[in-house]
Each structure stands twice: as structure tokens, then as C-alpha cells.
Image (cartoon, rainbow, N blue to C red):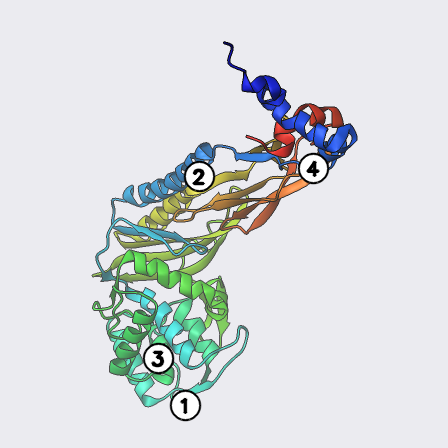
Amino acid sequence: MTTPDPAASHPSRRRGPWVAGGVTVALLLGAGGYTAASAMTPLAAPSVTGADQTEWNEMTAAAATAATETAQAAVDAQTGGAAAIGWQDSDEVWSNDPAPRPIASISKLVTVLVGLERVPLEPGADGAVHVWSGEDAARQAGYIAQDGVAFPIPIGTEVSTRQMLTLALLPSANDFAAAFAMMTIGDDAAFSDTVSEWADRHGLDSLFLAEPTGMDEANVASAADVVRIGRLALANPTIAEFTGMHSADLPWGIGTVKNTNPLLTKLPGVVGLKTGRSSSAGFNLVTAQESDAAGRPVIKFTAVLGRDSGPDRAYASSALLTAMDGAAQPLQLVHPQELIATATTIDGEQIELVTDGSANTVLLPGEAASRDVALDPVTPGTAGQRVGVVTVTSPTGDAEVPVVTAAAIVAPDLWWRLTHPALVFGWD
């Protein structure tokens, strides 16, 4: 006896998956309905795979490391005393010796910075008038007795703030620096306390001043903090005006006074700042120089402390400034037509997503750069359509570089839709 085959009376049960899918739809909807459904069903958006960023990350890290290592090597090469370097646009400082050392007349930069907080002076202005007193004259005589720099004037002479700062910062006159401190802050005890509070606010942990001129060997700071003081001084437009002067003419028979900075007229781009010298401190110099770092305008700062002579401090400063040029690292942040991602359409076509532009920067020691990719949903369209952006963050400024399609993205035609129902309708 033959057992009936249940499938024989139900032919559809012996059909393959395509029949169970596409033909069933066709039977239910009719040929026209299937065609319409295939044509009108939204297709899945292209999938996007980001390009490997390992090479870019490694390149960026290598540039930052090279900048830092070059900066440290520059100060490590200095063997004649303490040295430090830094840049105006960076908070970092590199030094070969963290110990506080006597800074001598570099103290006057701090004196003027602190005094101008109390009694501001606009660039070019004369400011308040101080009448030269018997106390001023007595201090003046004391500085002369110690072989300090002083310019005697009669008691009762009216001296403008501008004249006091000119004499304190160009020829490094102790008497006029002390008079300015007394006028704006007070006696040595008040001055020392005020400077300590100011140093705390600015993170100058090694700085201590017992008095305003630098004649006292207790006035100390590390080379790194001297660079930081130089930054603060040059950022003050009034102080920058004085430290950049080559010479000035004064009344009372003083005549022309010259800036003691040996590099101001000898090295291109030098815009200040201050010398210091004493038997204990040796020869000190903090210098600022405007420069071009691989196309990026920068201001470099150097500090050298404890040198054996004036020429020695000038040579050491010049050598440091030159060595700093090698620390700047040009970095291409985005290359033209750089592959950012690949879009794969539902029918298997691969279209590269590339940058439409470029971006670059120059890293100084201690700086970093980054970039972030944001892509929009990719849809059919012509080549060059914008599909996202690369946002760049760098010390020289932020930028946005568009991401575009390298070729047209074409939607599948009707025949492809009709013959690929599983992809069209999303069947597994």
C-alpha cells in the first residue's frame, strides 16, 4: 500500500526560498505589484568604514616628542651655568637646573611688574610725578658706595614715572628702581611681602626678592622662573616699550642712557629684556626674540644665569635662541584628497570619502594637535558631494575641512531591484 505524499497535494511546500519569497509576493500582488514594491521600497543606506588612523596618530605623537626632545637637548647642551628656554605661546619651560640662583638686576623686571599692578602706566604716558626726597638721596648714596648704578639728582627734582622706569630698565639704575618701588608699594618689608603674594599668583615658586634692585644677593629665582618672568614682562606693553628701547635722553645733566642688553642691537629680532650682574650672581641675561618657526611667528625666551662674563652670557643666549629653531615641528594635519572612509552601497560598490582641502600647523614643544571626523548619512549623488567634515584643533587655530565623495554614488536600477529581492526587502 502506498502512503500518500503530503507535499504532492501542496506543491508550494517543495519550492526553494526564492519561490517562497519573491514568487509568493508576485502571486499575492501580481507581477505589477511586485515590480512596484521593488521599485518603491527604500534601500538600506551605504555602510561606512573609517580609514585606519594609526599612521596619523603616530606621526602626530612623533612630532610632539621631537619638539620636546629638541628643547631639552638645547638646555642640556649648556654647561656654563643655569639655562632655560620657552615660547610666548606655550606654558612650558625647559631648564637644565631647577635651583634658585641670585638674579641681580633682573629683579627690576619684577619690581616694575608688581608696581604697575598698583599704579598702571599706559605706553607713552608720563604717569605720576615723584618729588626726589632726602630719603631717595640717602639710598642713592648707599648704592654709589656699593658700586651700584645710580644717577644723582638734586632733592626736590620732579621725576615722572616714565623717567623712573626709563632709568631703572635701560641703564639698570638702582636708585630709580628703589624710588619707583617706594612710590608704588612701600619699604623693603612691604615690597618683599607683596612680591611673594604676586609670585604665588603666577606660580613662580622659586622667586624671592628681599628688595627691589637686585643689589641684595637674597634676590633669587630659578632659570625657568626667569623665563616665566620674561613672558609676563613682554606681555605688558608698557614694560615691552622700555625693554625694547636702545637708548633714551634724560634731563638733569644725565644725557643719553643706553640699554645694557648686549643682544638688543646685535641680534635680529631681539626685543628685550634685561641683564643682571653681581659678584655673587655672575652675569645673567633674559632675552626675548621674535622669530619665524617654519612659517609660524613666535617669540622665544631664554634665560642664562651665573655666566663668567658679559660676552659669555651673550654667546650662551644666542646659542640657545638658535637651537630653539630646530624644536618647531611642521605637521600636516589633513592631506588633500586624504582617504577618511569608504562607503559600500547595497549593491557592493565602494566609494572613497576623501578630504576636499588640507590643514597644517607647527608644533612647539609642549603643544599638541588633534582632529575629529564627523560623517553624515551617505546617499546617492554626484561625485564631490559633501558627506562630513574633519575638525582640526591646533595651536595655530582650528579649522574644518570638508569630506566629499570621490565618485558618484548611483542607486541600483530596477532590474537589480527585481533580481535581488532579499536585499531589497531585507530578508535574511
The residue that label 4 is drawn on is: 41
Q: CA distance from mark 3 to mark 2?
A: 48 Å
**Mark 3 or 2, nearer chain start:** 2
**Mark 3 or 1, nearer chain start:** 1
Q: CA distance from mark 1 to mark 4?
A: 98 Å
Callout 1, which amino acid?
Gly
The reply to whether dot 3 and dot 1 touch (C-beta < 8 Å) is: no
Quarter the C terminus occupies: top right
At a point 40% along the width and 44% down the height, the residue shown is: 324
The residue that label 3 is drawn on is: 181
In the depicted structure, whether residue 120 falls above or below residue 350: below
Residue 156: image tag: 1
**Mark 3 or 4, nearer chain start:** 4
Callout 4, which amino acid?
Thr
Q: CA distance from mark 1 to mark 2?
A: 64 Å
**Mark 1 or 4, nearer chain start:** 4
In the rendering, at what x and y percent does residue 290 appear? 49, 52
Q: Mark 1 falls on what kind of element?
A: loop
Labels in figure, total: 4
For residue 339, say whether it is visible.
no
At a point 49% along the width and 39% down the height, the residue shown is: 330
Residue 341: image tag: none
